[in-house]
Amino acid sequence: MPHFHIDYSANLEAVVDMAALCEAIRAAAAEIDTFPAAGIRVRATRVDHVAMADGNPKHGFIDLSVRLREGRPDSVKKDAINRIFMALKDFMTPAMENHSIALSAEMRDIDADLSPKFGNVRDHLED
């Protein structure tokens, strides 16, 4: 854990390099001690059907959802989401100079008892 899920409006596909955004979020998360590198997952999903603001299709959005195992103090989570959101804002600054884009982020705890995990990523990490 954590999992980072980016939902974005389809009209941003020509404006934003989503693979680069995923990498920017991954790199920022890797710098935060509370996020173990082996657990970081970043993915982006295009949302084709969107209605927002005044209905003008020029408006776009990026919504970043962060899910992580419960147990971290609120102060740690607040610092982490602020740092990740800053990375998102910094990445999006050039696009937002010429495009109408709303950014949002939310962090949620995952109940460990209700979220089984298995994998061997740690066995394949380079030290």
Image (cartoon, rainbow, N blue to C red):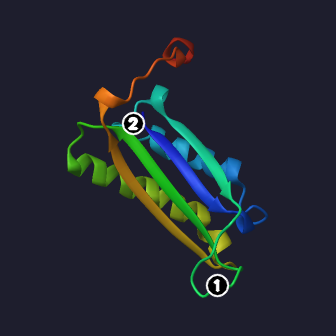
Locate the N terminus and report the quarter of the image it occupies.
Answer: top left
Q: Which residue is located at x 29 percent, y 54 percent?
A: 78
Position in image of residue 81 (x %, y %): 37, 54
Q: Earlier in the sequence, mark 1 or mark 2?
A: 2
Position in image of residue 25 (x %, y %): 54, 48
- The correct choice, above or below, for 54 with respect to 38 in the image is below
Q: Is residue 102 left or right of residue 67?
A: right
Q: Is residue 36 left or right of residue 58?
A: left
Q: Label 1 sits on what residue type?
A: Gly
Position in image of residue 99 (x %, y %): 68, 78
Q: Which residue is mark 1?
A: 55
- The correct choice, above or below, for 89 with respect to 80 in the image is below
Position in image of residue 106 (x %, y %): 40, 57
Total tally of numbered discs in the picture: 2
Question: Which one is nearer the viewer's eye here, 26 or 45?
Answer: 45
Q: Which residue is located at x 65 percent, y 70 percent?
A: 50
- The correct choice, above or below, for 125 with respect to 23 in the image is above
Extreme-bottom residue of the structure: 54
- Picture quarter containing residue 125? top right
Q: Is residue 102 left or right of residue 46?
A: left
Q: Residues within 10 Å of mark 2 (few under 14, many from 20)?
A: some
Q: Nearer the viewer, mark 1 or mark 2?
A: 1
Q: CA distance from mark 1 to mark 2?
A: 38 Å
